[in-house]
Image (cartoon, rainbow, N blue to C red):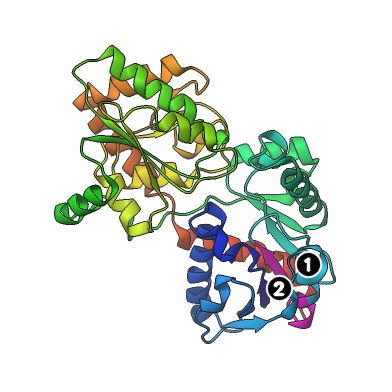
Amino acid sequence: MRIAIDSWTLASRFRCQGTYVYTQNLLREFKKLARERAGLRFSLFASARNGNDAIHVAPEDGFKLWSSALLDHDRIWRFGGAGISASRSHADVMFIPTAATLPVGPVPAVCTIHDVTPITMPSHSSAVSAMQRVLLKGCARFSDTIITSSECSKRDIVTHLGVPEEKIAVIHDGCDQSLFNTDLPDMTELAALRARLGIEKPYLLHHGTIQPRKNLKRLIQAFHLMLANNADLDFGLVLVGQLGWASDEIVSAAAERRGRGRVILAGMLNEADLALLIKGSSLAVVPSLYEGFSLPMVEAMACGAPTIASSTSCLPEISGNALIYFDPLSVEEIAACMQKVLRDPDLSLHLRQKGTNRAREFSWERCARQTLEVLMKAGRPHRN
């Protein structure tokens, strides 16, 4: 079986975004599977000219880099170039890790549609969102099979894109347990990281792209309300992640205070520093309005951080109803939920234990093996 992999989502500008992390982890596991199974061959498209990190993936037996000049031209690649390259590489099936490349051409394709945010809750400008919707609908129509990461996203794909249920496979994302785990943090390293970021007090944490869908303006308001109602609580709020579309209001809200109730925009961190910061937090908060899986929530749970989350979209499903949930539209409810956990050590410990147990169920190895099964089924009738 020869599997071609679209590398578009490995563009360097996407580093630390969920689809990039998803693709990188699957590539690592696909390499292991290629060593195990005779006759299994992966080709990852790469080009040295376009700032795509695929060029840095080390080839080995059963896993090669396939050079394609078409990858240098973004729109050509996404609107047919990938399919042409898959055909030239003699692939039996093409895997597209995110709905940004049209699966057109003679090679059958499996596409991962992580969520339908371009339709339900756009996270970019109107022009970019319109392009995303075109590609999303094209992937839904032309893919042989669609992979998605939650039952919630599956329902949304059926509802908004008219895809038959039998065409969709639900495969949960994984979590890198080598980094995101309950091992005790190195306190010297944590202190140095906190000093570098200017974190002087115990802190609450959120990580993810700074954008309206993450509901961070309400989180900041709820954080300040909680402190106003509890004079003896003294925490900071740390927001980790790159600035995304329409982040100006969030940045302004974060800058309002400098003393008690300070909000720190930490920017992007590498995964080792992120895991360290999560482990040092007093509480992780996931106030998103919509998610297709929420890897940040799973990572916080895996690190043993007491975690609370919105009651919306896939969050109760993915967390296994192991957390405490709130209405993300209610600043008062978010504040009360944070206060409840911070004031109750037994509840905090309960959330740590329940969250950790649930997070252990998410493995990139399992995700890769289930993804390979879907790919082999899609490619099987077309094998030479």
| The magenta segment | 85-96
Q: Is residue 177 visible?
A: no
Image quadrant of residue 126? top right
Q: Report the side of 55 relative to 234 (left or right).
A: right
Give above or below for 328 relative to 205. above
Q: Position of residue 349 (x, y in %)?
A: 23, 33
Q: Position of residue 261 (x, y in %)?
A: 30, 26
The tally of labels here is 2
Q: Position of residue 11 (x, y in %)?
A: 59, 65
Looking at numbered disc 1 in the image, what kind of residue is underneath it? Pro
Q: Is residue 93 magenta?
A: yes
Q: Report the side of 205 relative to 168 (left or right).
A: left
Secondary structure of the residue carrying tag 1 is: loop
Q: Residue at x 44, y 37 (%)?
A: 319
Q: Is residue 8 magenta?
A: no
Give above or below for 317 relative to 34. above
Nearer-N-terminus badge (1/2): 2
Residue position for label 1: 108
The crowd level at tag 2 (other Cα within 10 Å; few <14, some 14-19, many 20+) is: many
Front-lying residue, 115 or 32: 115
The quarter of the rendered structure image containing the C terminus is bottom right
Image quadrant of residue 97? bottom right
| Label annotation for residue 71 | 2
Q: Position of residue 3 (x, y in %)?
A: 67, 74
Q: Report the side of 87 relative to 331 (left or right).
A: right
Give above or below for 309 relative to 292. above
